[in-house]
Image (spheres, rainbow, N blue to C red):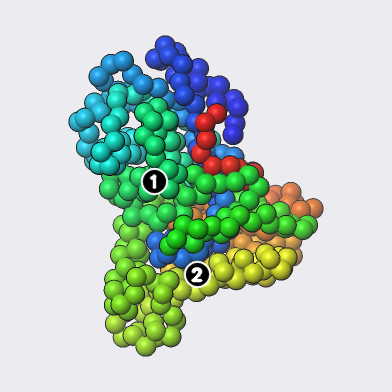
Amino acid sequence: MDTSLFSKIKKAFSTEFQDEPLMIFSPGRINLIGEHVDYNDGFVFPAAVNKGITLAIQKSDKELCTAIAYDFEELYHFEIRDLDAIDGGGWRNYVIGIIKEIQKLGKEIGPVNLLFGGDVPSGAGMSSSAALENAIVFGLNELFALNLSKKDMIRISQKAEHNYVGVKCGIMDQFASMFGEENKFLLLDCRSLNYEPYHIELENYELVLINSNVQHNLSESTYNKRRALCERAAVEFGKPSLRDVTKLEIYKKQEVFTPEELGMLLYVVEEIERAQRAAEAINNKDIRTLGELLYDTHQGLSEQYKVSCEELDYLVNFAKTSNAVIGSRMMGGGFGGCTLNLIEKESVASFLTDINKSYEEKFGYQCTPINVKLSKGTHLI
């Protein structure tokens, strides 16, 4: 957590509302492997990071509530009992969605004021949206003694994104942001929500994020279409989700799907297997196999699931030409954001210089590294 951001957010709240706020930090996340499988009940390998959303929140003595997005210099007034999603409302719909989903549970919330800011690069695919959702629900739970469990809260966050933002996301982002542990990745079973913390010994390698600076937007219909395809296929196979479907079963019914759809379904089944193989590689301290799995995931995301873009493919293909890199893939929902790379520690600086020069020559703007540490989940500051 950035202490200077904490100070700015707290001071801005106190200046605006003449009150002492409750302060919450909710982290963004990275994901080692297991992409686009959380909404298929699969296995994923995320971690919370030390960049995220800092929220100041307090009860209001007025009927009119105020929410302020510090970074955007935007303000939103609303009444707690009269809320509906706003067409094109952006961050406001996260606030609205959380409050409405809590109210659906019969929980009583009074008027509030809140102000938030973040240090996750915009559009980087590190789930600042889940961090914001979790921060708000966590703050309201504390202020109004709602007695919500962490699992209750992440379900509320997920439903807010489904019903008020329009993204049919899985549960991974909210879970990682809420349950994150310092210096640990979490091998999460997205069906049971059982998880196992992993401290990964990377030996003489370092995990490095490189931001393509192409901003992705999960509201794009392409994301929701993929989820709809997965759900339709599960029904076709008579199974709860694609987690329960084998590649052989898919091939036996391949005439039901277009060639493109077939590739997407095979990717999901293969990626669920890859996440489990990654856990085995980590247990065996086989970092090279882990790196190969990252490359395989990117190929699947790009060629089968078709959620990559030219810039992300360029970054991964460049990484493949370097002896210093043993694994690289796009991370997140796709269509932009970051690549995640396993790079030899002593070669990180020179590799970043080389890839940035090549990337700028190709696209006319720079890619940028993002330094993160693995963090604990949403908490009071």
Determine which residue is flagged by label 1.
152
User: Which residue is pictured at 49% across the width and 26% down the height?
Assistant: 23
User: Which residue is pictured at 67% across the width and 68% down the height?
Assistant: 281
Q: Which amino acid does the dot numbered 1 rest on?
A: Asp
User: Which residue is pictured at 25% across the width and 41% down the height?
Assistant: 104
The reply, left or right, for residue 188 in relation to residue 222 is right
Query: Where, quadrant-wise, is the C terminus in this rendering?
Result: top right
Residue lying at the far bottom of the rendered structure? 252
- Residue 39 percent coordinates (x, y): 39, 61
Q: Which amino acid does the dot numbered 2 rest on?
A: Ile
In the depicted structure, whether residue 124 falls above or below residue 60:
below
The reply, left or right, for residue 355 in relation to residue 226 is right
Q: CA distance from mark 2 to mark 1?
A: 25 Å
- Residue 247 percent coordinates (x, y): 44, 81
For disc 1, the neighbor class at 10 Å (few under 14, some 14 to 19, many from 20) is few
Which mark, residue 272?
2
In the depicted structure, whether residue 282 falls above or below residue 164:
below
| Mark before the other along the chain sequence, 2 or 1 | 1
The answer to whether residue 90 is visible is no
